[in-house]
Image (cartoon, rainbow, N blue to C red):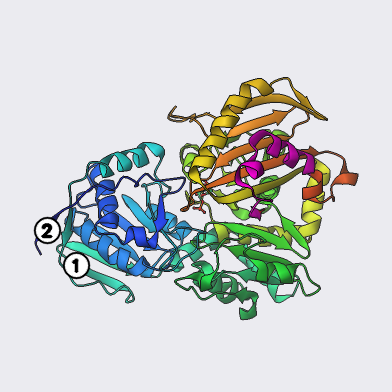
Amino acid sequence: MQVKIITTQPYDDQNPGTSGLRKKVKTFQKPGYLENFVQSIFDSLEDINGKTLVLGGDGRYFNRQAIQIIIQIAIANGFGELIIGQGGLLSTPAASHIIRKNNAYGGLVLSASHNPGGPDEDFGIKYNVSNGGPAPEKYTDEFYKRSQSIASYKTLDMADIDLDRIGSQTVNNVSITVIDPVSDYAELMESIFDFGLLKNSISSGYITLLFDAMHAITGPYAKRILVDMLGASPESLINAVPLEDFGGHHPDPNLAHAHELAEVMFSSLAPTFGAASDGDGDRNMITGNNIFVTPSDSLAIMAANAQLIPAYAKGLSGVARSMPTSQAVDRVAARLNIPCYETPTGWKFFGNLLDAGKITLCGEESFGTGSDHIREKDGLWAVLFWLNLIAAKHQSVADIVHEHWRIFGRNIYCRHDYEAVESGIANELITHLRKLLPTLAGQSFGDYAVKYADEFSYEDSVDNSISKNQGIRIGFENGSRIVFRLSGTGTVGATLRIYLEKFEPDSSLHNQDAQVALAKLAELAEQFCEIKKRTGRAGADVVT
Ligand code: G16
């Protein structure tokens, strides 16, 4: 088949955000839009001739069409082998594992993660490098640069590949293999956790569970691992059939969006353990009978108890968290005498630390936790980690959390999101905060004396790259913090995230409501950034 060179015009909005390029489906359907971005990626990579590319997505609307388009561009650009998940499906963690397992050159993951799907909703595309992790900024900057001058892309006229039939075929000397998206990943999970113990704890009834796949990618993964391999009842899974529009919901695992799960977990019918995952399977929400575990606490608890899990029995080399994530894990690292790194938001910043063996576990407040087993955050891995902990410690989720707070103190934490704020207003707000920072040092607001007020900048300790403007931080002498950032994953206007954190060492105060405990900090945050005043809104759209 003859390679065709198609003339095209650049689009000016192809700058990847926190995790790849995310736009409305309708944007991706503009003539040449997807093609331009994929060609820009391939143009920016060196020496792709004959190399292996992994391809898969979360199954949202436009996934199948996009995969066929990408197959044609990949073949025309000289890749030698394509490995594709059956039905065009691969969860983000499974894609990361398959890239690593096959020593692939890289992979393209099609997802807009927790954002809604459907013809009028969101789509996304992300390039992962050979370590299985999201491309670092030096790559994504290059993709964008290339997209601004692109004049043509390469493709082929070919029939669609049958994405549903597992097996290999050759097209234009390129080997195309459609694989079962679940089995390699399930095997990896079995090598990390104590499946024997888990099976016994489930069959004996000690652990009862409810997993909400939110009509997203983890349905088939949860079915294979939790039901077929570990013996949980099929009723333990809800919303387990992936749908192109996620049933019209946000596949975002928090108490607001995973409300079906939340209702059960905070009722008299609650099982021992409840969890949810997101659109592409890399996020997780952990709950127990009448308790929600914040992602920051979950990371800290995992770090403190990791030695109970077979794969981490030898201990952790170090841990890392994104800057806005609470400092609970720092306390664990100090006690374990291991390093704790603070990175900007975005899983891509953990890649170098993981590759260098500097950290074993890492996580983010945005419902992401993971380890050195792959280079993405991993929803079902986190679920299995917690199930393994419950089984090994023979404690309920609530007991595990309360014991942790007793030992380490509680970092009371919460995030307020103001979504779809008009971009002009959001940018003015950030400019205003930047001007305010130098005036805050040394000031006191009631019990809150400002210790530092700055903009987070990160120097990667492995390759010394520097990432500036990664969020505005106001820290207080008593250990409390307020952080402000604009999200890099939204597709409409700007989303302002306000992160509030207060350390509470006194165990008699550990059970207080986070909103009550953080009320003064929330008031100060408004005083500093004036989001309500500037937008006329009464409060945040989502509080997690
Ligand atoms: C992505 C990134 C995460 C990041 C999250 C939120 O997650 O992989 O590292 O924490 O976005 O980013 P932001 O605050 O900029 O919206 P996902 O699950 O959306 O791929």
Whether 278 is drawn above or below 489: the answer is: below
Graded by Cα atoms within 10 Å as few (under 14), some (14 to 19) or many (20 or more), the crowding at tag 2 reads some
* Kind of residue at disc 2: Val
Q: Position of residue 68 (x, y in %)?
A: 27, 66
Question: Which circle, 2 or 1, is nearer the viewer?
Answer: 2
Q: Position of residue 308 (x, y in %)?
A: 68, 52
Q: Does label 2 or label 1 sit earlier along the sequence?
A: 2
Q: Position of residue 90 (x, y in %)?
A: 42, 64
Whether 203 is drawn above or below 5: the answer is: below
Graded by Cα atoms within 10 Å as few (under 14), some (14 to 19) or many (20 or more), the crowding at tag 1 reads few
Residue at image position (49%, 29%) is 461
Of helix, strand and loop, which mostly describes the magenta segment? Answer: helix
Circle count:
2
* Kind of residue at disc 1: Thr
Look at the image and say whether residue 540 sits in the magenta stretch.
yes
Q: Which residues are magenta?
A: 518-542
Q: Is residue 385 left or right of residue 187?
A: right
Residue at image position (48%, 57%) is 93
Q: Is residue 169 visible?
A: yes
Whether 384 is drawn above or below 509: the answer is: below
Residue at image position (62%, 54%) is 310
Which quarter shows the N terminus? bottom left
SS label for mark 1:
strand
Q: Which residue is mark 2?
A: 3
- Quarter-of-image position of residue 204: bottom right
Give the distance between the C-alpha atoms of the residues marked 2 and 1, in whole angstroms: 16 Å
Return the mark for residue 170.
Answer: 1
Disc 2 C-beta below 8 A from ligand 1: no
Look at the image and say whether residue 479 sits in the magenta stretch.
no
Q: Is residue 320 visible?
A: no
Q: Position of residue 80 (x, y in %)?
A: 21, 56
